[in-house]
Amino acid sequence: MNNILNKTLPVAVLGAGPVGLAAAAHLVARGFTPLILEAGAQVASNLESYRHVRLFSPWQYNVDKVARGLLLAAGWQAPEPEALPTAGEIVEHYLKPLAALPALAAGLRLGHRVVAITRAGFDKVKTRGRKDAPFVIRAATLEGEREYLASAVIDATGTWSQPNPLGAGGLPAQGESALRDRIAYGMPDVLGVERQRYAGRRVLVTGTGHSAAGSLLALATLAEQVPGTRLIWVIRGRQSARLFGGGEADGLAARGLLGMRLKALKQSGRLELHEEFRIASLAATASGITVSGDTGATIDGIDEIIAATGARPNLGITRELRVRNDPWLESTDLLAPLIDPNEHSCGTVRPHGHRELAHPEHGYYAVGAKSYGRAPNFLMATGYEQVRSVVAALAGDMLAADDVQLELPETGVCSTRQAYASEPVASACCGGPAPSQETACCVADAEAKEQGKGGCGCPSLPNLAPSAKPAGCA
Ligand SMILES: Cc1cc2nc3c(=O)[nH]c(=O)nc-3n(C[C@H](O)[C@H](O)[C@H](O)COP(=O)(O)OP(=O)(O)OC[C@H]3O[C@@H](n4cnc5c(N)ncnc54)[C@H](O)[C@@H]3O)c2cc1C
């Protein structure tokens, strides 16, 4: 791809999350003018919604390099690289200062929810001359709809604001909409501002990822403090070994430690686990919510529900653009084989850049969590490398654009020493460059853990010769 842009129009960045703001920093560094359209009343609205959560990757992987350079030049104090920040600390100590730099602040429009993108004078069908037409971005604001022109679009709108519904089939469960005020999607601050909502209540949590585990452990702490708080965990499958992770032998240290705490919770009888329960409907009764599964099983007397069932990208805004997404992950098409959770048990993905992120619509890129679609294993550091490559391509610096590398060690990004453990624990198979046979590694990792053994690169296996490790593991 040649340099496709004249610089008279801005490059639009949709979403001022960590990846969108990093894209803006790269644009500034390469002499572009970014126009940043953010739906929320402040930057990083999604991280803000779970600001109480301590992340599992340390600062050194959460700050984009070019953004860091701009901040340091403005007198910023860099945080301790090994420390694990909360989401709120990322917002306060990194993203807000970054967005406040004059070169970014000048183009930042808060309260601008993008509702549609097209090309000026070109509907989706029309081809000739298309790639030279500017993009038109329509945004909903408090003052009504506004339109902006841009020479290219970097869509970093994430997925978090579009949570998956409770229904196992991907549609809202029957009755779900009517009970909306009793359901929290995501990770409510159970021990903080939402404490009264959950104290002494029967709370059903559904989901099998980091968010569900985090909410269950917070509820367990609340239950120790407030008698009568009850935890009910509903999962669609029956895969306890994978759910509880590999314990101390888990290649993902944070997951292993979370899993061990959950397992202990279950064994203590304080966690009521319903396996193979696929939610079909919800109904309000005098004694609380009755949750029914598709086999006819029911759980009665629920006061509150926490839905941690993942999220999906907003594909509606690009309806008028020529985009090519994977049919089921809804990720950018070429990324799908690398991140399909049907195949991958962990967060490894080969470094990738503008070529994998490109769409038939010349000059439009989905980056960040949105580029992964419904796949849950996105990491900020991956997004920073994505936008470095994309912006280099927009600038016509194809040497830099094609020199894609994710500078994470295979161990380290999931190191944790505060969130779930008192001592630092290194881990592998999460976020670092995938070993050359990344699929083999991930499958071997999952299978080994299901049999109660160590996965690839596990802390329990550091002294094994590479040849003695499971197939595909570096
Ligand atoms: C509980 C939890 C813990 C996590 N821990 C880690 C971790 O330790 N390490 C790690 O690397 N990653 C972690 N992640 C993943 C991390 O949140 C994502 O990697 C990161 O937020 C993705 O950044 P993003 O900029 O792509 O999207 P987001 O952070 O989701 O930002 C998207 C932005 O776009 C805005 N937006 C949405 N729609 C529109 C629209 N239509 N118009 C305009 N603006 C819009 C949103 O308001 C938001 O500000 C965690 C996620 C969760 C949920």
Image (cartoon, grey):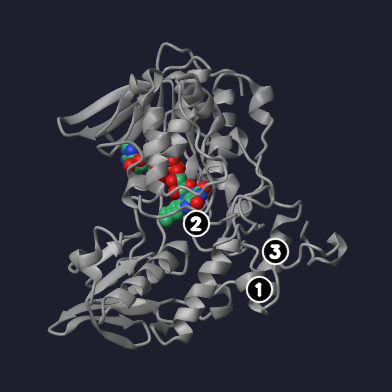
- Which residue is located at x 61 percent, y 36 percent? 353
- Outermost residue on the left side: it is 286
Sequence order check, earlier mark of 2 and 1: 2
Structural crowding at the residue carrying mark 3, measured as other residues with C-alpha within 10 Å and reported as few (<14), some (14–19) or many (≥20) = many
Separation (CA) of disc 2 from disc 3:
24 Å
Give the percent coordinates (x, y) of residue 459.
70, 64
C-beta proximity under 8 Å, tags 2 and 3: no
- Which residue is located at x 40 percent, y 39 percent? 17
Return the residue nearer the eye: 142 or 65.
Answer: 65
Sequence order check, earlier mark of 2 and 3: 2
Q: Is residue 125 above or below residue 300?
A: above
Separation (CA) of disc 3 from disc 1:
13 Å
Instruction: Name the residue that disc number 2 marks.
Output: 376
Instruction: Name the residue that disc number 1 marks.
Output: 449
Amino acid of disc 3: Pro
Instruction: Name the residue that disc number 3 marks.
Output: 459
* Nearest-to-viewer mark from 2 and 3: 3
C-beta proximity under 8 Å, tags 3 and 1: no
Residue 262 visible in the displayed image:
yes
